[in-house]
């Protein structure tokens, strides 16, 4: 903006209480206090927590808070008629399209779900949501059990502790913590290594966490259950870069363990495979040093913005490091907490799909499909050679097709397919999804004005080609004159 460019800053926060109730965009677990209903107070708290917002106002940036970007579009394989890159925006009351030359996407991170029995109860929440609510003074938790020991979840636990929440225990399935030891020492909570969450118990919401020990082979030890009284269980077993917008516009992605999984491929300017589209912050990669020092993310944003206006910076790039086996860690949590669980918790809560449904590729339960004949339930037998495809499993089981659009189950499904298909996690492709990347009422998204070009090419918005074809094209392909007469 100071370089004379017209800049629009869009942020979906403060998130409406109704969206938070549906765990959108984060896994809030019904642990937000009544303060979130006061939009003015939440906006004020948000600006107070981020002084750069006020600086953006002063610099003449068009700041749009409480506004979502539900889609990004650019000419490519499925669209070829757009005048340029376009963003779909909505403030909850209306929706509109905004053209742009360059976009810096900094959509942050979310937390991987973990389908242990009882994880659908109010009180089970993600670490990122806990931090967000704690910093806004809107976290309604008193005593929490934390799952995982990464830098991300430990820093979240410290933020909760500073907000007045007692950390009852930190549970880690590995034989030793994977995060910084100084954070664990600062937290001062009991750490249970070689333990896994068995279930969450309570009448209407979480009242206690039941954890069980694991032997040297990662198997549960019978009779080792420990009950820990709490009202909140924090999911910190995997932090996920939020790449829905970069994926929606067609940026190339790659599985990079050092950056937290699937991330957009970027150059040293943080530009993606699409010119003028940049990724910065946690959506471009998550690692411990970046989590603990926000200046790394700030430098990424500056570098991207400078390149967008033609003034590249020569700042040194921060390189990610990883002190543990990313894939093995994630798979071990899913195996111990989900596959070996007592009971059949829903991995996909929206569509009521269990881990066994996914591993055996069963149709949705509500179809009540029963057959005396059953194929070999081995994934390789059911789905063919190669790595199992989340998209194929989604079509057969509906896992990932609910309101949350796969945010709670996408990584779990990938881990289950790696375990069931006996393939490395890196070989399981990222499941696809479509815009809008946030649920929207049809009355809002349907109000977007359609120019003549859009109406004339509506099918290309969905990647559809040649769907409407006359019968003459199939019956008489070698008789042009007859084709013309028939068509006429």
Image (cartoon, helix red, strand yellow):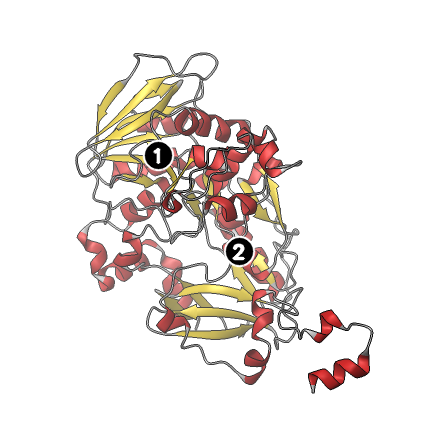
Residue 284 image offset from top left, x and y in percent? 54, 49
Q: Are marks 2 and 1 in contact (CB under 8 Å)?
A: no
On screen, residue 476 above or below 291:
below
Find the distance from the CA under tag 2 to the CA under tag 1. Answer: 40 Å
Residue 408 image offset from top left, x and y in percent? 40, 44
Residue 212 image offset from top left, x and y in percent? 33, 19
Asked if residue 71 can be seen in this view, the reply is yes
Element type at mark 2: helix
Asked if residue 322 can be seen in this view, the reply is no
Residue at (44%, 39%) from the top-left corner?
292
Q: How many marks?
A: 2
| Residue position for label 2 | 301
On screen, residue 20 above or below 370:
below
Precedes in sequence: disc 2 or disc 1: 2
Tell me if 323 is positioned left or right of 77 in this view. Answer: left
Q: Residues within 10 Å of mark 1 (few under 14, many from 20)?
A: many
Residue extending farthest right: 478
On screen, residue 456 above or below 292:
below
Residue 239 image offset from top left, x and y in percent? 45, 40
| Residue position for label 1 | 345
Tell me if 99 is positioned left or right of 110 in this view. Answer: right
Q: Residues within 10 Å of mark 2 (few under 14, many from 20)?
A: many
Give 454 or 34, whichever is nearer the viewer: 454
Residue at (45%, 64%) from the top-left corner?
69
- Give the quadrant of residue 116: top left
Element type at mark 1: loop
- Give the quadrant of residue 156: top left
Query: Quadrant of the image for the C terminus?
Result: bottom right
Foreground label between 2 and 1: 1
């Amino acid at each position: 903006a100071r370089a004379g460019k017209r800049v629009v800053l869009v942020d979906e926060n403060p998130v409406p209480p109704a969206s938070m109730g549906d765990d959108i965009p984060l896994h809030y677990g019904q642990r937000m206090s009544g303060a979130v209903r006061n939009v003015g107070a939440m906006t004020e708290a948000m600006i107070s927590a981020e002084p750069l917002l006020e600086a953006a106002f002063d610099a003449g940036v068009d700041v749009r808070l409480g506004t979502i970007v539900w889609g990004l579009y650019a000419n490519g394989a499925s669209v070829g008629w757009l005048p340029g890159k376009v963003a779909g925006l909505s403030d909850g009351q209306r929706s509109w399209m905004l053209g742009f030359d360059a976009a810096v996407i900094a959509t942050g991170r979310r937390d991987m779900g973990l389908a242990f029995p009882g994880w659908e109860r109010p009180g089970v929440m993600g670490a990122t949501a806990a931090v967000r609510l704690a910093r806004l003074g809107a976290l309604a938790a008193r005593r929490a059990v934390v799952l995982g020991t990464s830098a991300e979840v430990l820093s979240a636990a410290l933020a909760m502790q500073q907000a007045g929440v007692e950390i009852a225990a930190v549970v880690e399935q590995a034989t030793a913590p994977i995060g910084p030891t100084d954070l664990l020492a600062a937290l001062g909570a009991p750490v249970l290594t070689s333990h896994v969450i068995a279930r969450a118990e309570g009448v209407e919401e979480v009242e206690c966490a039941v954890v069980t020990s694991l032997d040297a082979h990662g198997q549960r030890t019978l009779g080792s259950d420990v009950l820990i009284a709490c009202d909140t269980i924090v999911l910190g077993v995997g932090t996920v870069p939020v790449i829905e917008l970069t994926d929606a516009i067609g940026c190339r992605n790659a599985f990079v363990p050092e950056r937290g999984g699937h991330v957009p491929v970027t150059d040293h300017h943080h530009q993606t495979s699409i010119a003028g589209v940049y990724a910065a912050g946690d959506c471009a990669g998550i690692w411990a040093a970046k989590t603990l020092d926000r200046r790394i993310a700030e430098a990424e944003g500056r570098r991207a913005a400078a390149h967008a206006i033609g003034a590249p910076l020569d700042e040194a790039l921060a390189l990610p490091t990883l002190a543990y086996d990313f894939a093995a860690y994630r798979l071990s949590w899913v195996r111990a907490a989900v596959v070996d669980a007592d009971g059949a918790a829903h991995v996909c809560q929206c569509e009521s799909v269990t881990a066994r449904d996914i591993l055996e590729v069963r149709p949705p339960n509500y179809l009540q499909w029963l057959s005396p004949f059953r194929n070999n339930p081995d994934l390789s037998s059911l789905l063919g050679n190669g790595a199992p495809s989340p998209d194929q499993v989604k079509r057969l089981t509906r896992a990932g097709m609910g309101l949350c659009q796969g945010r709670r189950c996408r990584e779990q499904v990938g881990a289950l397919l790696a375990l069931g298909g006996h393939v490395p996690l890196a070989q399981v492709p990222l499941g696809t999804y479509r815009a809008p990347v946030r649920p929207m009422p049809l009355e809002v998204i349907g109000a977007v004005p359609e120019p003549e070009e859009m109406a004339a090419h509506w099918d290309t918005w969905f990647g559809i080609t040649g769907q409407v074809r006359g019968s003459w094209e199939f019956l008489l392909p070698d008789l042009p004159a007859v084709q013309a007469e028939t068509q006429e």
